[in-house]
Amino acid sequence: MNVIYAPITFKADYEKITKLVDDIKGDKAVVTVSQFKSVLEKINVKVKGLVLGCDAGVLENFKGGTVIFIGDGLFHALNIKNSYPDKKVLTLNPYSMALSEITDNDIKRFKLREVLGREWVKNAKSVGIIISTKPGQNNTRKALEIKKELEKIGKNVYLFMFDNVDPDEFLNFKGLDLLINTACPRITMDDFEKFPVRIIDLTIVEKILI
């Protein structure tokens, strides 16, 4: 099957976004993801660019105090705050125009999930591992490694392969105690409340088992 990738265009309210950015005082950087890159062309700041996955290297030499992430979801903004804890990190949702700040408490909350995740792995009897077929997100080899290590300590392990991960699919599988996400880590951070089963990222399991 041939896969054709087509660019997705985003029609933004550039005027409103630009005003919101301009109203934020002080030296600031603006970052976004490729889906919203057209927004960057309209914003006049010295430091701006794209974040790719967990890589926010565009901010490496930024000396100012405020980073504005334009996008939906918390994954990228939390990663930026975790990487640059001395910066004020704001999220600007280009759909709702909501502006909010990522706080130290937000970071603590997600780090708490990591602590809890270790206990969830320890106590789980049946574990599902999510694998994505999408290029750049496929971690089949890592999933099989985790499966092998979990089975060594007596877990029942099941593999679930998706193109698009749908949390509702897991309503059809009773008896799962835990899901391990080897696809996009954003799923674990932004969408975990949508799943009927507890879900953690593969990095937590790697720290325990591999």
Image (spheres, grey):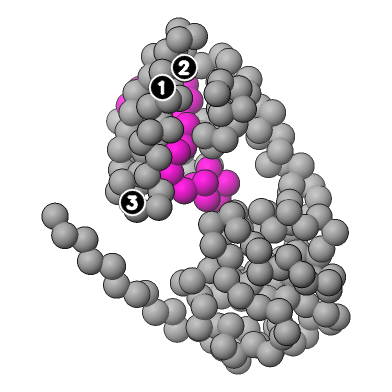
The amino acid type, in three-letter code, at marker 3 is: Lys
Coordinates of residue 178 in the picture (x, y in percent): 48, 25
The amino acid type, in three-letter code, at marker 2 is: Leu
How far is the residue under mark 3 from the one under mark 1? 20 Å
Position above or below: 132 against 32:
above
Coordinates of residue 160 in the picture (x, y in percent): 32, 33
Q: Which residue is mark 3?
A: 134
For the point 42% across and 13% down, which residue is it?
Answer: 151
Q: Look at the image and tell me whether residue 115 can be seen.
A: yes
Coordinates of residue 130 in the picture (x, y in percent): 39, 36
Q: Which residue is mark 1?
A: 147
Q: Which residue range is magenta in the image? A: 173-191
Residue sticking out furthest to the front: 61
Q: Earlier in the sequence, mark 2 or mark 3?
A: 3
For the point 31% across and 46% down, which residue is it?
Answer: 133
What secondary structure is found at the residue carrying circle 2?
helix
Residue 180 lies within the magenta run: yes
Coordinates of residue 146 in the picture (x, y in percent): 45, 25
For the point 83% across and 80% down, which residue is it?
Answer: 27
Q: Look at the image and tell me whether residue 96 can be seen.
A: no
Position above or below: 195 against 103:
above
For the point 48% across and 43% down, which residue is it?
Answer: 194
How far is the residue under mark 2 from the one under mark 3? 24 Å
The amino acid type, in three-letter code, at marker 1 is: Lys
What secondary structure is found at the residue carrying circle 1?
helix
